[in-house]
């Protein structure tokens, strides 16, 4: 009986040893070499794993940075130019600086500007509401106000205003990761160039309906009149599908388009008061 036990133990040990040897040689045969610089680059990244770079996580992005011949389309929005410079130093390359960007909400359809014609009583997500109806104000392109953009933001950079029912971006916290852009089913959130003193000029409407219909649903809707397009001296404004769009890369912030817009659909933010505004204030 004892001999059987001994033989069994010896057999199991031999099988285990043979399996270990086989697994070792298989592992060596199919071993994948990973460039040690990948981990070094990953350590230099912000570890946000937000996907703003277009890759699933920082490790995958680091691997792409090490292996790619061109960095033209590669950039970490969270770390910005400083992080890309560190990565470039690790890899002995030259980083291409990019202008910082910030998320902008292109809808100004607050309750004071749009009549409420329906009431939504379904699942409280923009994605589902978008597939079911046009919106409480009737605009099929406006913000639904259910905060899908807020849920996906990992940086606490966007919140819903309870008065306007619109999302508000906290510019100092926004990393331009693009998560809110992807989450919005109406495509009203856009990443735009961040100017000095955070000044912005943009058309706060993406409605593609004709003027009369658009204005009926929202009094500050873009009606596609093209007045802004005609006065822009820098060819920064284009007209397409009954709406105007201001290219933040071409815009020189001259504000000529703002004053000619008949519906006040073009917003100017963080500018000093105009001279006319100051005179009116003094007189009042």
Image (cartoon, grey):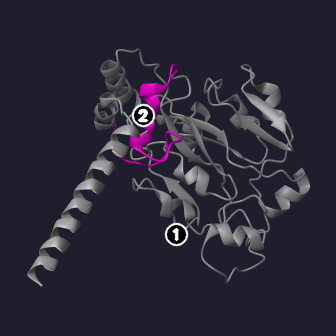
Q: Which residue is at the front of the view, 42 or 21?
A: 21
Precedes in sequence: disc 1 or disc 2: 2
Residue annotated with mark 2: 63
**Residue 28 coordinates in the image, percent (x, y):** 33, 39
Please check the rendered image and state whether residue 159 is part of the magenta-colored stretch, yes or no.
no
Residue at screen point 35% across, 22% down: 85
Q: What's the mark number on residue 210?
A: none
Q: Distance between the residues labelled 1 and 2?
A: 43 Å
Q: Please state which of the two labelled residues, at mark 1 or mark 2, is closer to the viewer.
A: 2
The answer to whether 150 is drawn above or below residue 273 in the figure is below
The answer to whether 180 is drawn above or below residue 30 in the figure is below
**Residue 165 coordinates in the image, percent (x, y):** 58, 66
Stretch of the chain drawn in magenta: 45-70
Residue annotated with mark 1: 162
Please check the rendered image and state whether residue 52 is part of the magenta-colored stretch, yes or no.
yes
Q: Which residue is at the front of the view, 19 or 34?
A: 19
Residue contact at pointers 1 and 2, CB within 8 angstroms: no
- Which quadrant would the N terminus be assigned to in this image? bottom left
Q: Which residue is at the front of the view, 35 or 124?
A: 35
**Residue 215 coordinates in the image, percent (x, y):** 83, 57
**Residue 116 coordinates in the image, percent (x, y):** 74, 74
Where disc 1 sits, the SS reads loop
Dividing the picture into quadrants, the one containing residue 91 is top left
The answer to whether 180 is drawn above or below residue 238 in the figure is below
Predominant SS of the magenta segment: loop
* Left or right placement of residue 26 versus residue 151 in this view: left
Q: Check disc 2: other Cα within 10 Å, few if <14, some if 14-19, many if 20+.
A: some
Residue at screen point 39% across, 38% down: 29
């Amino acid at each position: 009986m004892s001999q059987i036990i001994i033989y069994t133990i010896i057999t199991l040990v031999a099988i285990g040893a043979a399996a270990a040897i086989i697994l070792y040689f298989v592992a060596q045969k199919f071993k994948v070499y990973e460039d040690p610089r990948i981990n070094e680059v990953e350590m230099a990244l912000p570890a946000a794993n937000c996907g703003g770079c277009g890759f699933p996580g920082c490790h995958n992005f680091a691997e792409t940075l090490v292996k790619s011949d061109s960095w033209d389309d590669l950039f970490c929005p969270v770390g910005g130019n400083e992080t890309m410079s560190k990565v470039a130093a690790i890899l002995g390359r030259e980083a291409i600086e990019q202008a910082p960007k910030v998320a902008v909400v292109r809808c100004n359809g607050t309750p004071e500007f749009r009549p409420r014609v329906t009431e939504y009583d379904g699942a409280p997500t923009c994605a589902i509401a978008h597939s079911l109806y046009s919106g409480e104000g009737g605009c099929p392109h406006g913000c639904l106000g259910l905060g899908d953009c807020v849920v996906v933001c990992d940086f606490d950079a966007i919140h819903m205003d309870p008065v306007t029912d619109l999302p508000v971006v906290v510019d100092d916290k926004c990393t331009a990761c693009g998560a809110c852009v992807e989450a919005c089913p109406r495509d009203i959130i856009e990443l735009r160039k961040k100017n000095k003193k955070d000044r912005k000029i943009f058309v706060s409407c993406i409605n593609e309906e004709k003027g009369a219909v658009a204005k009926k649903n929202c009094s500050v809707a873009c009606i596609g009149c093209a007045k802004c397009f005609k006065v822009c001296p820098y060819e920064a404004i284009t007209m397409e599908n009954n709406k105007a769009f201001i290219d933040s890369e071409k815009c020189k912030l001259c504000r000529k388009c703002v004053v000619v817009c008949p519906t006040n659909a073009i917003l100017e933010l963080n500018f000093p008061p105009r001279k006319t505004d100051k005179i009116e204030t003094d007189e009042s």
